[in-house]
Image (tube, grey):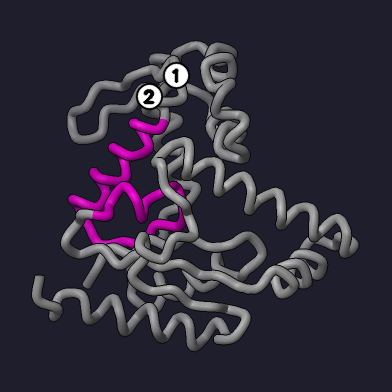
Amino acid sequence: MAIITVQRGYGSGGDEVARLAAERLHLPLLDRQITSAVAVRAGVSEETLREATKSPSLLTRMAELLARYPMDDLLSWSMAGLPPVPPPTHEQYRKLIDEFIREVAAREDCVILGHGAQVVLKDHPRVLRVFLVAPFPYRVQRVMLEEGLDRKAAEQKVAQFDRDWRAFFQTQYGIDWVDTRHYDLIINLGRIGQEAAVDMIVRAAQAIDQFPR
């Protein structure tokens, strides 16, 4: 099988595709679980870490955010014998996220949604890096329907997420997140439905072990 990383455009429907692919492959889907585990390891509030990942602009305030939540020994976590490390800077926070992703990938096959996993695991021999995209109008329409927003508000929200993700990947990893070289499989959900997209991911994941490296 494979470790599947899924990056998606906001409003594309990629979250649902990732969930369905994980179910079809009988693999765990990791998204919020990553944030929860790392928050415990760092001894900070999960909400603090969620806030810090919403927008790259917040990363510059990571030290201030973490300072609001003192280390709690009762929440310290030492998976695989590693001691909890309080991250005073956003660089150390990202290191904890990256280390956790590598630890999971070393233990088991799984589907990882977001968190820059396609970059963190780019050299893993059995990773399948998936990018789920869709045209801007398609995503705007989905956001309007799912979140009850008018068109202008939906357009602003989708555009803001695109800017945030571009800035995040450029700042943290020095890459353009839409550069096709960072993915093995790119699916346009605006042209290919969710069911067909799941089929493509499943077939690609099953082929990983058979492909010579």
Which residue is labeled 2 in the image? 92
Which residue is labeled 1 in the image? 89
Note whether residue 203 is visible: yes
Q: Secondary structure at mark 2?
A: helix
| Residue 96, percent from left and from top | 35, 31
- Quick check: 199 above or below 134? below
What is the magenta range?
A: 94-122
Question: Contact (CB < 8 A) between labels 2 and 1?
Answer: yes
Mark 1: amino acid: Thr
Q: Residue at x 41, y 86 (%)?
A: 199
Among the 4 quarters of the image, the one containing residue 22: bottom left
Mark 2 burial class by Cα count in 10 Å: few <14, some 14-19, many 20+: some
| Residue 156, percent from left and from top | 79, 53
Disc number for residue 111: none
Mark 1 burial class by Cα count in 10 Å: few <14, some 14-19, many 20+: some
Q: Residue at x 28, y 76 (%)?
A: 205
Q: Residue at x 39, y 41 (%)?
A: 173
Verify whether residue 153 appears in magenta. Answer: no
**Which image quarter holds the N terminus?**
bottom left
